[in-house]
Amino acid sequence: MIPRYSRPEMVAIWEPQTRFRIWFEIEAHATDKLAELGVVPKEAAATIWAKAKDATFDVARIDEIERVTKHDVIAFLTHLAEIVGPEARFVHQGMTSSDVLDTTLAVQLARAADLLIADVDALLAAIKRRAFEHKLTPTIGRSHGIHAEPVTFGLKLAQAYAEFDRCRARLVAARAEIATCAISGAVGTFANIDPLVEEYVAQKMGLTPEPVSTQVIPRDRHAMFFATLGVVASSVERLATEIRHLQRTEVYEAEEYFSPGQKGSSAMPHKRNPVLTENLTGLARLVRGMVTPALENVALWHERDISHSSVERMIGPDATVTLDFALARLTGVVDKLLIYPQNMRKNLDKLGGLHNSQRVLLALTQAGASREDSYSMVQRNAMRTWEHGEDFLTNLKADKDVTAKLSVAELEAMFDEGYHFKHVDTIFRRVFGEA
C-alpha cells in the first residue's frame, strides 16, 4: 500500500502498533481466563493488564529482538516481559504462535470489513440520490456498444445500486466467515490449554470460536474473504467503465467533475480526461490480483505450514486499503458526476427512431405477418436509415408491405417514447423499496 491510494482509518488497522496491541489483548485475555481456571495466579494476570494496558510498544525494539530470534511472536513476548516483569512468564501458557497470529488477522479483517461495509453504504446513498434525480431522464440503451432501445439514466444507476447492495450482503457474509478465533495450542488439540480459554478470548475480541482448527484457522475462510473483495472491485470497475464510455467525446452523456484549476493534459490544454474512473479500473485489477494467492493458500501441509504467511502479510493490508480507497473515490465520482440530458437526447435521436424497431416487428406479427416476413420488412427499412440517414418512420410509412398490415396512425403510435418507460416505477420499487 502507498499513501497515494490509502486512507488513514484503514491504514491504521494494519500499523505495527495496532497489531501489537491486538496481540497483547489476546494474550492478556487468555491469561485472565487461565487465572480464573486456576492455571496461573490471578495477581499475575492483573499485573499484566496494569503494566501493559496503556503501554506503547517499542516497534524498533521488537524488530531488534526479532533480528536475533528470527521469530516475531517470541520477539514481542520478550519485549512484553521487559514491560511487565517476572509475571510475564505466565503469558502464552499452552498457546502457539498461530493462536495469536491467526486470531489477530481475524480481528484486523473483521475491522477492515466494517470499514468496507460503511464505504458501500456511502456509495449506495450517492447512487440512490442520483438515480432518483434522473429516474425519467431518457437515454439510449446499448448492447455491444450499439444503440438498442431507450432506458433512463436513473435505471442505469438503479442497476448499479442493486449490484452494490449485493456487494454489501457479500461483505457482511465474508466478515462473519472470517471473524473466528483459534486458541487451541499446538496442532489444535487443546492438549495444553482449555477450550474455555478460546471461548473467552473470542467473546472479548468480538469473534466466534473456530469449530476445528489444526494449528491454524482453515484458509478457505480467507480465500472466500478475498474473493469477495475481488467481486466488489469488479463491480467498482463495471460502473467506472460505464462512466468512462459515457465521457467519450463522441458520446459525452456524463462526465467526471472537472474542478477549477484542474489540468487534463501536460500537452493539450483542452483535455478533460476520465482520470478517476481510469484509476478505479486499475485499482480493481490490483484487488482481483490478490484473489488467486488467497485461493492458493488453502492447501497447507498437514496441521500447518507458513507458506500462507508472507502472502497474507501483503494482501491483507493491500487489498483492504486499496478497495477502501476505490469505494470512497467512486462515491465521490458518482456524487459529483456531471450529467448531460441534452446530449442523451441528441444521441437518442441520432438514428432516426431505429430504437423502435422491435415494437414495429411485434406489431406486424400481431397483425398477421410471419415473424420472418415481419423481420425482413423492418430490417430493410432500418438499413436505409443506417446507410443513408433516412428517417425510419418515414421509410415505414412508404413501405406498402408494412402499411398493408399497419395504418399510419398505428405506426406513429409505436414511436411514443413513453412506451419504453412504463415499468420504471416497478423496477425502482424492486430496487429501492416502496418508498
Image (cartoon, helix red, strand yellow):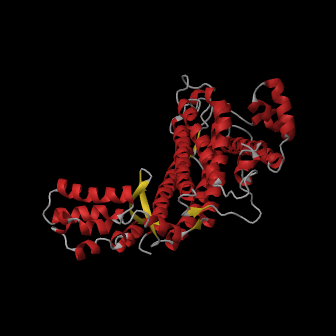
Residue at 50% over, 68% down: 131
User: Residue 344 in the image: x percent, y percent?
Assistant: 49, 67
User: Residue 264 in the image: x percent, y percent?
Assistant: 71, 55
User: Residue 406 in the image: x percent, y percent?
Assistant: 19, 70
Q: Nearer the viewer, residue 33 or 110?
A: 110
Is the residue 216 above or below the residue 166 in the image? above
Can residue 426 be seen from the camera position used here?
yes
Q: Quadrant of the C terminus?
A: bottom left
Is the residue 215 above or below the residue 84 in the image? above
Q: Quadrant of the N terminus?
A: top right
Q: Nearer the viewer, residue 65 or 366?
A: 366
Residue at 77% over, 25% down: 70
Count of labels in the image: 0
Q: Say left or right for 345 vs 107.
A: left
Q: Say left or right for 289 vs 366.
A: right
Q: Nearer the viewer, residue 250 or 154?
A: 250
- Occupied quadrant, residue 433: bottom left
Residue at 68% over, 42% down: 317
Is the residue 376 above or below the residue 68 in the image? below
Residue furthest left as drawn? 368
Q: Say left or right for 396 vs 48.
A: left
Residue at 64% over, 38% down: 315
User: Residue 156 in the image: x percent, y percent?
Assistant: 47, 62
Can residue 37 be seen from the camera position used here?
no
Q: Say left or right for 21 vs 241.
A: right
Q: Nearer the viewer, residue 318 or 103?
A: 318
